[in-house]
Image (cartoon, coloured by chain):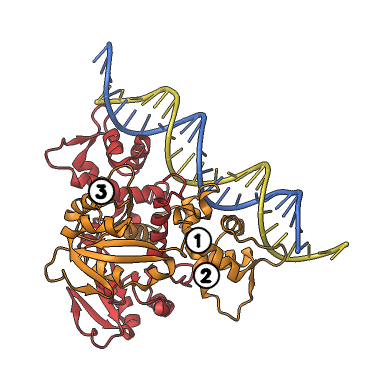
Chain colours: A orange, B red, C yellow, D blue
Amino acid sequence: MSKSESKAIGNCPVPESTLRRMPIYLQYLQQLSPQDTDLISAATIAKDLDFNPVQVRKDLAMTEASGRPKTGYKRRELLVAIENFLGYNKTDEALLVGVGRLGQALLSYEGFVKCGFNIVVAFDNDPQKIGTAYGDTEIMSIAKLENLAPRLGVKIGIITVPGGAAQTVADCMVQAGIVGIWNFTSIKLQVPEHVVVQDENITTSFTVLAARVNGMLQHA
Amino acid sequence: MSKSESKAIGNCPVPESTLRRMPIYLQYLQQLSPQDTDLISAATIAKDLDFNPVQVRKDLAMTEASGRPKTGYKRRELLVAIENFLGYNKTDEALLVGVGRLGQALLSYEGFVKCGFNIVVAFDNDPQKIGTAYGDTEIMSIAKLENLAPRLGVKIGIITVPGGAAQTVADCMVQAGIVGIWNFTSIKLQVPEHVVVQDENITTSFTVLAARVNGMLQHA
DNA sequence: TAGATTGTTAATCGATTAACAATC
DNA sequence: TAGATTGTTAATCGATTAACAATC
């Protein structure tokens, strides 16, 4: 069963808001100390995470786990169900272009392992870097991307180059059969319909934080 | 006029969804080539950014800019209005704790200047790093944070330490009078009511990208 | 059994989109 | 003037929350 056929697909599609809460539940369940009870109720989770208990139950209902009235959910079972729901048990391979500070940070981030994410190769245009490796990941010339990516069957590309080079890199990725681009620049990329772009805009994040601190935001 | 008294405050509070689109409009207006017309309509912006035109007009109406029927908005005027709306013309100062790869990437990110964001000092517990500087930013012992932050009047703290140290750092920041924490770890931080925490969870972002690529998401 | 907790159906709320009047 | 575009008011849509029936 490939990732695209996983549990969630047959059922109704998942709202992004629900999806975004799932890793939070997972982290919460993982950090509970082993001494804590083996059973946990939606009310407890909700209280600890500042969520609405109904929302928690609805979210968890999208996984294959089910709770039992009076007792709640089995902690371990729920944890595994969420991992399966999120496809963390299957591996997604990616390539990365731009081995600067940010690229290096991503290459050395150990948290990706837990969610089945693996950066298999990196590219840069700096001759000093080409041919070396960063951790386990080889750094190659960008010229090799177009040829190598299809052979590796990699479907996800990470762009951590300066903004000026982003569109060129994106074009190259599309040529190479990449269908999901994780874009860390603030450039709006032009890509064909079938390619998904996820923008990771650090400036936007800061803007939201500043607005919340300054009380400009609605709920905050 | 301090940031907290800026335009948006007197009026109705801003929905986060609107706020998040503002930097996108700004980037769009900035990247338009100078040859492009000096006037731009909401319809054009909407088409280029794949937004709904009514949404664009409603968003822009929250700024002090106003368009004219038949002609549209003055590009330069709109650009400045958005910058003011977002408070990019005022400076927000921050301190950063944890000068690893990610911390370094943030310290060297030049895009913060445009949005009035300035990291004035960094902290680490590595004796090798303490006393050195990264770019213009001095790296000091974490022990000095509690004393220094209030003197500098810094209100925003960035946490880029390993997860295990995150809560301790957060506690220290709260003691030092920090009221906004930008948390790059996946730990759920415990803080007093008055402190705003913005979680920047790279794993969640990846999860959303993977879900979109695999067609698990609703709209995608 | 009684009480607690789940899971579902209905109500509320807010954001997006549509319809339209105002205006240049 | 006629036509295009803004800005606002109303309708739709989806997510959150409340009410409640089912069940252990």
Q: Residue furthest bottom?
A: B127
Q: Quadrant of residue B74?
A: top left
State the residue position of label 1. Answer: A22
State the residue position of label 3. Answer: A189
Q: How far across and how far down the image is residue B117, in percent?
A: 26, 63
Asked if the residues shown at circle 2 and circle 3 are in contact, with their CB atoms under 8 angstroms apart, the answer is: no
Question: How many C-alpha atoms fall within 10 Å of the one at disc 3: few (<14), some, or many (≥20)?
Answer: some
Say which amino acid is labelled 3.
Leu
Residue at the image point whose x is 30% and y is 52% from the top: A178
The residue marked by circle 1 belongs to what chain? A
The answer, for residue B118, to whether it is visible in the render is no
Q: Is residue A120 left or right of residue A140?
A: right
Asked if the residues shown at circle 3 and circle 1 are in contact, with their CB atoms under 8 angstroms apart, the answer is: no
Q: Quadrant of residue B68?
A: top left
Say which amino acid is labelled 1.
Met
Front of the two marks 2 and 3: 3
Q: CA distance from mark 2 to mark 3?
A: 35 Å
The residue marked by circle 3 belongs to what chain? A
Residue at the image point whose x is 61% and y is 56% from the top: A54
Figure quadrant of the C terminus of chain A: bottom left
State the residue position of label 2. Answer: A28
Q: How far across and how far down the image is residue B112, in percent?
A: 24, 61
Q: Is residue A176 left or right of residue A5?
A: left
Q: Label 2, secondary structure: give it.
A: helix
Question: How many C-alpha atoms fall within 10 Å of the one at disc 1: few (<14), some, or many (≥20)?
Answer: many
Whichever of labels 3 and 1 marks the residue nearer the N terminus, that label is 1
Whichever of labels 2 and 1 marks the residue nearer the N terminus, that label is 1
Q: Front-most of A199 and B210?
A: B210
Dots 2 and 1 on the same chain: yes
Q: How far across and how far down the image is residue A46, in percent?
A: 58, 63
Q: Front-most of B102 and B35?
A: B102
Q: Front-most of B193 and A31?
A: A31
